[in-house]
């Protein structure tokens, strides 16, 4: 048609670009409450998700130094303790945070309200953020958010250079929360007067680096290292490496991890450092009791049959047996 024509054909309105909603960060169905130490052990975390990975938030605006300093000036001692706990564990649920830092309120409901209020304030300052999907647990349930350090939080209490841009896998988050479950269970046992909890260090702070064959550096990766005593008046301390298994790995995989502990024990590094080698506790869970018991018997038998493993350093239990085992200093 000539450009000078007095009439033009009707035109369709512009079509907006197609927007496909992004899938949720985690696709986790609601689960039943699990035992305090239910999880997976470190060595089975997928290589595509490094242990210190942190998910990225949807917001990408930068926070200047002056703003960060202003935020820091508003933080209470408890705010800093909350951020420190999240930094150490990498992921914590609302229930974890309430139990660890808000147990001094008049009632659980008052503690829950205070916890939510503080976390919302920290979230608005971009100190913490939550995963897109929620994961249940004994200290949360399927409706509780899972928190991690956000941009400002990383800059305040962590090493920003170690930040990873990988989204965490469901297995990794469940494993991390299971370690937090264990820390909280030990804390609650101490408050109940069942044990004295001297130290509880989750991965990666509890990992041990030592010289292997030929002087090559090797890293042992426990899920958790704890030091306890039977009570405040006791003259003895007990040391523990705790491994948590959900029944997702084969028994040969667990045996390989046992051999890593045996190699570390024979190096003498821990004994030189602490004067004693910790008891290695396998806390084993599975979808049903029968499967868990079968795996416990299988792992116990294979350790006993292995000439290169000392079964004296291993304890293989179910989650409900952890606190009684610690109370007895590792004896059956």
Image (cartoon, grey):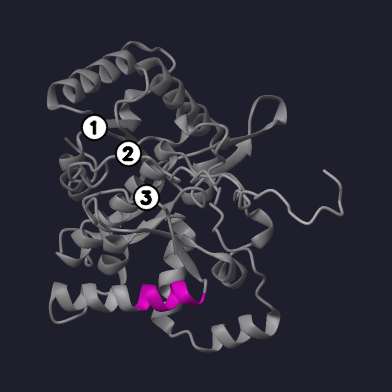
Decide if residue 41 is on the left or right side of residue 213.
left
- Give the crowd class for mark 3: few <14, some 14-19, many >=20 residues within 10 Å: some
- The disc placed on residue 285 is 1
The mark lying in front, picked from 3 and 2, is 3
257 left or right, relative to 155: left
Q: Rounded to the nearest whole Å, what is the CA distance between mark 3 and mark 2?
A: 18 Å
Residue at the image position 45 percent from the left and 36 percent from the top: 42
**Of callouts 1 and 2, the N-terminal one:** 2
Image-based side of 193 in relation to 89, left or right:
left
Q: Residue at x 42, y 64 (%)?
A: 85
Camera-side residue of 163 and 236: 163
Per the image, is 233 magenta?
Answer: no
Residue 248 is labelled as: none
Circles 3 and 2, Cβ within 8 Å, touching? The answer is: no
Magenta highlight range: 118-125
Q: Are marks 1 and 2 in contact (CB under 8 Å)?
A: yes
- Residue hosting label 2: 39
Mark 1 or mark 3: which is in front?
3
């Amino acid at each position: 048609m000539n450009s000078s024509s007095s009439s033009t054909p009707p035109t369709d309105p512009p079509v907006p670009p197609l927007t496909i909603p992004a899938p949720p960060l985690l696709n986790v169905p609601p689960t039943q409450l699990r035992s305090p130490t239910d999880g997976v052990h470190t060595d089975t975390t997928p290589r595509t998700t490094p242990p210190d990975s942190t998910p990225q938030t949807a917001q990408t605006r930068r926070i200047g130094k002056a703003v960060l300093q202003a935020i820091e000036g508003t933080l209470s001692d408890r705010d800093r303790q909350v951020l420190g706990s999240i930094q150490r564990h990498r992921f914590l649920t609302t229930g974890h945070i309430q139990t660890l830092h808000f147990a001094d309120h008049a009632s659980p409901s008052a503690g829950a309200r205070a916890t939510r209020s503080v976390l919302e304030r920290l979230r608005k300052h971009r100190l913490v953020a939550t995963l897109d999907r929620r994961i249940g647990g004994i200290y949360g349930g399927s409706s509780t958010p899972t928190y991690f350090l956000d941009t400002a939080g990383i800059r305040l209490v962590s090493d920003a250079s170690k930040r990873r841009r990988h989204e965490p896998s469901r297995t990794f988050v469940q494993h991390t929360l299971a370690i937090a479950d264990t820390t909280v269970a030990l804390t609650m046992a101490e408050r109940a007067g069942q044990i004295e909890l001297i130290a509880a260090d989750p991965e990666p702070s509890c990992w041990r680096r030592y010289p292997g064959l030929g002087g090559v550096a090797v890293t042992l990766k426990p899920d958790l290292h704890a030091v306890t005593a039977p009570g405040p008046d006791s003259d003895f301390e007990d040391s523990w490496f705790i491994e948590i298994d959900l029944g997702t790995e084969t028994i040969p995989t667990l045996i390989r991890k046992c051999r890593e502990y045996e190699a570390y024990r024979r190096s003498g590094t821990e004994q030189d450092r602490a004067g004693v080698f910790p008891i290695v506790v396998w806390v084993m869970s599975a979808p049903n009791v029968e499967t868990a018991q079968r795996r416990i018997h299988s792992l116990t038998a294979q350790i006993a049959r292995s000439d290169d493993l000392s079964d004296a350093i291993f304890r293989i239990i179910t989650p409900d047996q952890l606190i009684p085992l610690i109370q007895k200093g590792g004896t059956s």
